[in-house]
Amino acid sequence: MAHESIEDIILQDDTRGISSLRSHLAPNYVEEASDLIVGRPGRALIITGFYIAYARASETDGPPGAVAIGEALKKLGYEIAYVTDEWSVEVVKAISGDAEVVEFPVATHFESAQFANELTARLRPSVLISIERAGLVGDGTFRNWKGEDISKFNAKVDHLFDQHPHSVGIGDGGNEIGMGNLREVIPGTPKLPDNPCVTTTKQLVIASTSNWGGYGLVAQMGLRTGHDLLPSVEQGYDWVKRMVEVGAVEGLTGESKDWVDGRDPEADAACLRDLHEFVAAQR
């Protein structure tokens, strides 16, 4: 199936209703996010890791998209560091190669803000990118897609975004960092939370699955810079497989299997296949 835009590709097979937010973003929102990143060379901090509390494990959505972005940015000359917390550090390390992985402590707001200040001062990031990372909601808690309080399993990485003007958030459910950009319109939208994340980013990327949003961003950065940056379908699956081997689970069921957000490997591969076809057609 031919698609007219990257946004069409990453919003296909939408099972959560996230595409209903598309009209509230710029038509070319992926391009706008890509331009922000490409225009800020230096070091990128990539924040990811979503803990599925009832499964006591981190999910397969998020880190593959994060590493796809990180590997693309390394090809463009950026330095990379990943940020997560104790609940997801092992799955991120399993696929992130030799890049630094920062473990953000689960602590009070004061301590978290202090850690964020010190980390920013040490690494001096030119851009922040969050993908599939639970963000604070209006009552000061973290909530999963069912609305359950998962605060004790989340480091308050939101404090990184409070002090940085150049940031991108990627999400698929309304409760992730960046969704604060649309916090006025998410409540009441079918299938999306009435209590969404309030943490904002400069640019927001929505997708049917957050990994797909990451892949779409990589595709656009490749078109923007003239480089071949997209991971292969096989690489995308290998990242998921390696995560599961060290304990990650499929997010909807909490099962230890190589699926992502309810999609088996073949269904999950549709996005990368379509992005490769789209990029090839643009050249």
Image (cartoon, grey):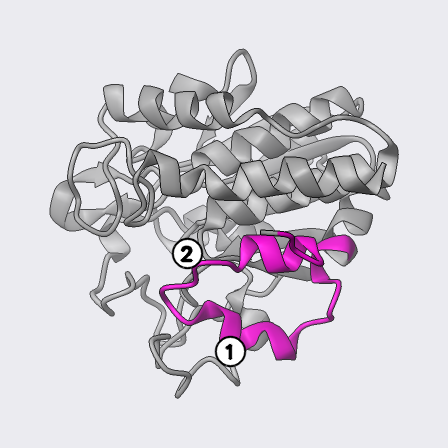
Whether residue 253 appears in this view of the structure is yes
Going 22% across and 26% down the picture, which residue do you hit?
247
Could you tell me the amino acid type at mark 1?
Arg
Q: Residue 142: percent from the left, percent from the top?
A: 32, 61
Q: Secondary structure at mark 2?
A: helix
Q: Nearer the viewer, residue 162 or 62?
A: 62
| Rendered position, 91 above or below 188 | above
Whether residue 61 appears in this view of the structure is no
- What residue would you read off at disc 1? 183
Q: Residue 230: percent from the left, percent from the top?
A: 65, 30
Going 47% across and 21% down the picture, which residue do you hit?
234
| Rendered position, 188 above or below 109 | below
Could you tell me the amino acid type at mark 2?
His
- Which span is picked out in magenta? 2-31
Q: Nearer the viewer, residue 228 or 101?
A: 228
> In the visual, does 186 lie left or right of 203?
left
- What residue would you read off at disc 2? 109
Q: Residue 261: percent from the left, percent from the top?
A: 32, 49
